[in-house]
Image: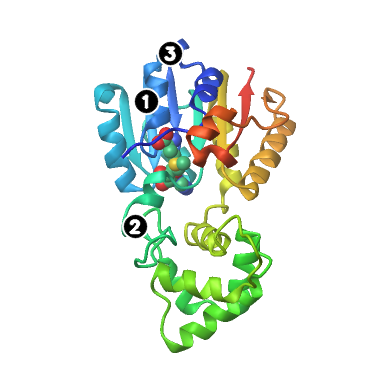
Amino acid sequence: MRHEPVMVAEVVELLVPSRGGLFVDCTVGLGGHSRALLEAGADRVIGLDRDAAALDIAREALAAWRDRVELVHADYRELDRVLDERGIAAVNGALADLGVSSMQLDAEGRGFSFRRDEPLDMRMDQSRGPTAAELLRDVEEAALADVIFQHGEERYSRRIARAIVAARRESPVTTTGRLAAIVRGAVPRRGYQRIDPATRTFQALRIWVNRELEGLDAFLFAAARRLLAGAKFAVITFHSLEDRIVKHAFRAIARAEAAIRVLTKRPLVPADDEVAGNPRARSAKLRAIERLA
Ligand SMILES: C[S@@+](CC[C@H](N)C(=O)[O-])C[C@H]1O[C@@H](n2cnc3c(N)ncnc32)[C@H](O)[C@@H]1O
């Protein structure tokens, strides 16, 4: 499976792995960014991911550097514990490339995509927590509408929630195909549609199932505390909800700590040729901070 890490040149330029040292990749995914850091001179990389299947792929992708890489099945919100357990006080650079990977979207049986009909799972970490189908079975209509509105920025959230609750009275909503059909049937048809009408609802449910926004700012603060003098922390996001959290957290971190500087007043975005070659990069935004002392 081909996987293009997003904004990899920008990440390498910012984190300067050519100076050597230890880097923590908080979302190692398929290993694309970690590989670039190692190729450019990083002495050691610790890679976290909550998805065990992703770590298997990263292990293969990084096999050539196996002595310099440690892959850990962990949530990035456990960063302090992961570093403490290894006796690491601070690192030479850190990266978080948030959201889902192309593998998670494309692999069969994960339930992230409305392009295929399969069980509605959507968990990044399939070893724990309820699936989307389980959450949809019990949630109240008003709470579901809030999830779809807040995490999907979907203006038809109430109609969609009502349609899902009506459908589940007939039988539980357990597949991506049925969910997509319910959503498509619930929103008004307008002429040309740029995206599938189910897109926002699927994004919202995915964020809800994985609690993607909870504790994100606490993690950003924790990672900032782990930077050595001169070390940078780069974060790539793929939607406005996350970008907003990163922007505000970075400002708050810099206000609270004189030694931290925000490097990106405006986020960096991928160059046109990257977007042309990798549509997934289209919505990427990169923000970074640096610890000066
Ligand atoms: C966009 S992909 C990263 C791709 C990676 N940079 C690469 O080059 O292959 C995001 C990854 O973050 C992981 N992830 C998402 N939320 C996480 C969390 N809270 N803790 C740890 N990993 C997480 C996902 O499982 C996914 O593999």
Q: Which residue is mark 2?
A: 126
Is there CB contact under 8 Å for labels 3 and 1?
Answer: no
Q: Nearer the viewer, residue 192 or 147?
A: 192
Residue at the spot 62% in from the left edge and 23% down from the top edge:
290
* Image quarter in which the N terminus is found: top left
Q: Which mark is residue 58?
A: none
Residue 197 percent location from the top left of the image:
57, 64
Residue 33 in sight here: yes
Distance from mark 3 CB to nearest ligand 1 atom below 8 Å? no
Residue 123 percent location from the top left of the image:
40, 58
Q: Please identify the quarter of the rendering in which residue 72 is found.
A: top left
Secondary structure beneath label 2: loop
Q: Which residue is mark 1?
A: 35
- Identified by mark 3, the residue type is Gly
Mark with earlier residue (3, 2): 3
Is there CB contact under 8 Å for labels 3 and 2?
Answer: no
